[in-house]
Amino acid sequence: MITKETLIENDFDLAIRKSQGAMLGLAVGDAMGDIGRDPEFRTRYGLATHMPADARSTDDTEFALLTARTLLDNHGEVNAEVLLVSWQKYIIAQGGIHRRAGRPLIGAVENLKRGILPPYSGIDNVFNNDDGAAMRIAPIGIVCAGEPERAAEMAEIEAQMSHDRDGVWAAQAVAASVAVAMVDGSTEEIIAAGRAQIPDDSWLGRTMELAMNICSEAEDMRAAWEPLHTQLWTPEHCVVTEAIPQAYALLRLTDSDFADGMFWACNFGRDADTIAAMVGAMAGARQGVSVIPNDWIELVRQPAGVCLKFAAREDIVSLANGLAKLIG
C-alpha cells in the first residue's frame, strides 16, 4: 500500500483518478448490472459484455450521490444533524423517492417525515438488513482514503439513517474496503479491512465466512459460481447477508480486476446491480478511472434521476473530483 500522504501530496492526480474510478465504477456496475439481469436483454444477448445506450442508474448510484453531496456540502463531515438536513433538502423537499428505491430507504424517509430520527429511523424500519446502505457508502471510503477505521465510524452514522445491525455493518465494511483500495491495498487487504468491521457472531459474519470458504475450495470462478448462488440464497428477498459476501467473493476471485469483476458481477443475476456497484467501487478505487471505457463513462456520468430528482443535475466526474479534494 501507499500512504495517504503519497496519495494527496506527491501525486494529487492519482487521488482524482482513484476517486473517479470508485464513483464511476459504482455507477457502471449499477447500470450494467441492472440491464444484465433484465429478461429482454438476456434473451437477446445472453450475457452482459457491454454497456447498452439505454442503461440507466438506479437507486444505488443516486443514493451514493446523496452521500457524496452531503460530504461536499459539509466539508467532509458526517453527523446526524447534517444528514437530516441533506435528506430533507435532497429527498423530502423534492417530492420524496420517486422510483426503484429499496424498501428501507422508503421507510426511512417516511420515518423522518414522522419525526422518527436516527438511529430509530433505521431500527424501526422494514428490511433494514438489506444492502441499501452498503450500496451508497463508497464516497465515505474515498474521503477516508488510507483510514479504514475512520471510514467505518463515519459509515455507521450514515447507515443508521435507514438500517440496523447487519445493514450497518455491511456499510462499514464497504467503506473500510474502499478506503484501503484508495491507497493501493491488495485484494487480501481490501477484504480484510471490510471483514474487520463485521462481528463474527452475526448473520453477516457467518455468511462472509461461508463465502470465503467457497472461494478457498474453488479452483476458479466457475467452480464457485453455483455454491455462491445456492448456499447464500435468502428466500423471498435478497438481503445484505447474501449480496455482500457475494460481492466480496467476486472481488477475491477476480483479484480486484475491474473488467473481470464487471463481467461476473453484472451477470450474477438476483441483486446484480448492487453487487456490481460494490465490486465496481472497490475495483475502481484500486485501479483508477483508466480501466473504465470512456463510452461507458459518458453513459453514466450524469444519472437519470429515476429515484432522486436532484441526481439528474449532478455530474459524477465533478463530484468525484470534489471528494478527492476532501481527502486529508
Image (cartoon, rainbow, N blue to C red):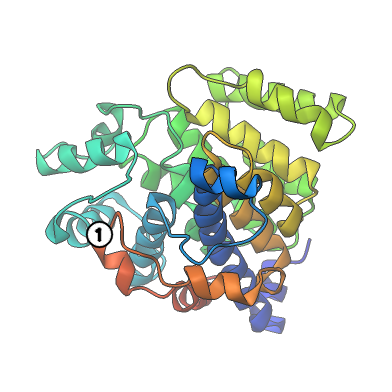
- Can residue 141 be seen from the camera position used here? no
Give the residue at mark 1.
86
Q: Position of 293 compared to 82: left or right? A: right
Q: Residue at x 70, y 63 (%)?
A: 183
Q: Residue at x 29, y 27 (%)?
A: 126
Direction left: furthest residue: 114
Of the 4 image quadrants, the one containing the N terminus is bottom right
Q: Residue at x 56, y 33 (%)?
A: 243
Measured along the vertical axis of the image, is residue 14 above or below residue 160? below
Q: Amino acid at mark 1?
A: Ser
Measured along the vertical axis of the image, is residue 175 above or below residue 123? below
Quarter occupied by residue 12: bottom right
Residue 33: image location, x then y, percent: 55, 49
Q: Position of 175 compared to 177: left or right? A: left
As helix, strand or loop, the secondary structure at mark 1 comes to helix
Measured along the vertical axis of the image, is residue 222 above or below residue 267? above
Q: Residue at x 64, y 60 (%)?
A: 50
Quarter occupied by residue 77: bottom left
Measured along the vertical axis of the image, is residue 297 above or below residue 38? below
Direction right: furthest residue: 219
Residue 319: image location, x then y, percent: 44, 73
Quarter occupied by residue 68: bottom left
Of the 4 image quadrants, the one containing the C terminus is bottom right
Residue 234: image location, x then y, percent: 52, 19
- Can residue 137 be seen from the camera position used here? yes
- In front here: 138 or 326? 138
- In front here: 218 or 113? 218
Residue 101: image location, x then y, percent: 32, 44
Q: Position of 262 compared to 90: left or right? A: right
The number of discs equals 1
